[in-house]
Image (tube, rainbow, N blue to C red):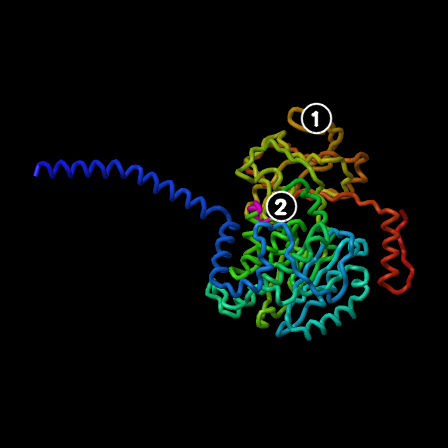
Amino acid sequence: MRLMWKSMDKMRCFRKRSMFPFLGFLITFLLLFNLYMDDGYVLEAEKRQLGETLMHPANSERYIHTFRDLSNFSGAINVTYRYLAGIPLPRKKYLTIGLSSVKRKKGNYLLETIKSIFDQSSYEELKEIVVVVHLADFDLVWCENLVQEITRKFAHHIIAGRLLVIQAPEEYYPSLDGLKRNYNDPEDRVRFRSKQNADYAFLLNFCTNLSHFYMMLEDDVRCSRNFLTALKKVITSREGSYWVMLEFSKLGYIGKLYHSKDLPRLAHFLLMFYQEMPCDWLLIHFRGLLAQKDVIRFKPSLFQHMGYYSSYKGAENKLKDDDFEEDSIDIPDNPPASLYTNINVFENYDATKAYSSIVDEYFWGKPPCTGDFYVIIFNKSTKISRIKIVTGTDDRQNDILHHGALEVGQKSVETRQGRQCTSYITLGEFKGGSIEVTNVDRKISFDIECVRIVITASQKEWLIIRTISLWTTQPVSVLQVSSVLAASSLFESPRVLWLPVL
């Protein structure tokens, strides 16, 4: 019996000694497994795609050319498109506007959308855009009839290389049978949104090398006047900052702007996850993968949904963007600049937030004291025609600047604290928390290098600077005058054109 107890004690000691390396191995395995599972969406996508290919070998053969190289997301997908109207020009434009359209059971808004794009653009703006329409319906008779209408109504834009109509052949599409029914959607709904993802993917893929930037619209949209000029103002103001997607509408896949260099990756991404979720949800994940954490949406919206019937079953769709404005010409320029303040900043409501036109962004600081400042230093001196600054918000109406002055400066020099202006002139005092000064370029004889808000009396309330809006002087050149003359001869009947005396 004594020998038996001794042997049992030895076994317990052995189990204790052997347990430690086993636990160490188990913990190491779990850590490695967790790292593997968390290694981004792309790795997960490759695993999922591999699993689906093994489970559905017949389907994978049909579209293997589409997913041939999952690791090369920067390369275009090899698709032979049908050119239904127009051909691409060799010179890159500034902006491509992409539309994908299918046959609707009720209503058709595509022609109105194309007309709005062209009608709301100036002659100078038209030279910088190309519109690509992807007719993504497999009903060839419908496509042929619609192409005839487009060609008849927009012939001069097609000839000028401003309008292209294309189609991706059906054989390039992934399988639309046996799709996952995520979110308990009915089968026809899953099929519709899965095909829509593929429609957009092939459109993006085609547009990769046509321009520097790409704007996605839907086929039932109305544009604000001079929307391209407004877009360019925003893009210019964000020089030096990183972004993947800028949003100019809060609805669906309307008014989403990308760098054209990102289109191949987005096309691959939509195709890889085409059956997982709707395209506007996928965009959120794509943006996050490329390290843009937050939505960057601008106000006012430049595009408005005008369709009444959805392309899905002709269902009613009365969605409207209440931030849309018909005339976008009043959007501020806000030239590239550095921003500084000695006011104590609350959390992440830093100085840059007030200078941005992004929705719901503003500067928020703790109670300022006499002599505190908020200064904007332009990257290069500029002529300013108008300045408008608003403090406080609707839900924090006391957090306004009660006593402050607006100044503009020149003669900037480098100091230990950074570049600063050495000479300032006061333009006016804040009243009711806001100030607006017009005709600044006529009141100030020099090109402005700095704009400064100075607190002239301490206050107990915190300070929110909601918006800082600056408009630059745009001189009328001889080239612009000649462009106006050319535009009038192209699109209007002969008449006398009166020009202002310069």
Q: Which residue is mark 1?
A: 414
Image: 244 above or below 351: below
Q: What is the x, y in percent for residue 270?
A: 58, 57
Q: Report, in whole angstroms, how far the alpha carbon at label 2 lies from the one at label 1.
A: 29 Å
- Residue 312: quadrant of the picture: bottom right
Image: 310 above or below 231: below
Q: Which residue is mark 2?
A: 243
Q: Residues within 10 Å of mark 1 (few under 14, many from 20)?
A: few
Label 2: state its secondary structure: loop
Image: 69 above or below 193: above
Residue occupying image coordinates x 62% and y 31%? 372
Residue range of the region highlighted in magenta in the rendering = 290-295
Q: What is the x, y in percent for residue 397?
A: 57, 45
Mark 2 or mark 1, earlier in chain: 2
- Residue 444: quadrant of the picture: top right
Are the residues tagged 2 and 1 within 8 Å (C-beta)?
A: no
Q: Three-letter amino acid code at disc 2?
A: Trp
Relative placement, left or right, of 474 versus 348 is right
Magenta stretch: residue 254 in it? no
Q: What is the x, y in percent for residue 66?
A: 60, 59
Q: Quadrant of the N terminus?
A: top left
Across the whole image, how many numbered discs are drawn on residues?
2
Q: Nearer the viewer, residue 12 or 149?
A: 12
Label 1: state its secondary structure: strand
Q: Is residue 329 visible?
A: no
Q: What is the x, y in percent for residue 406?
A: 69, 36
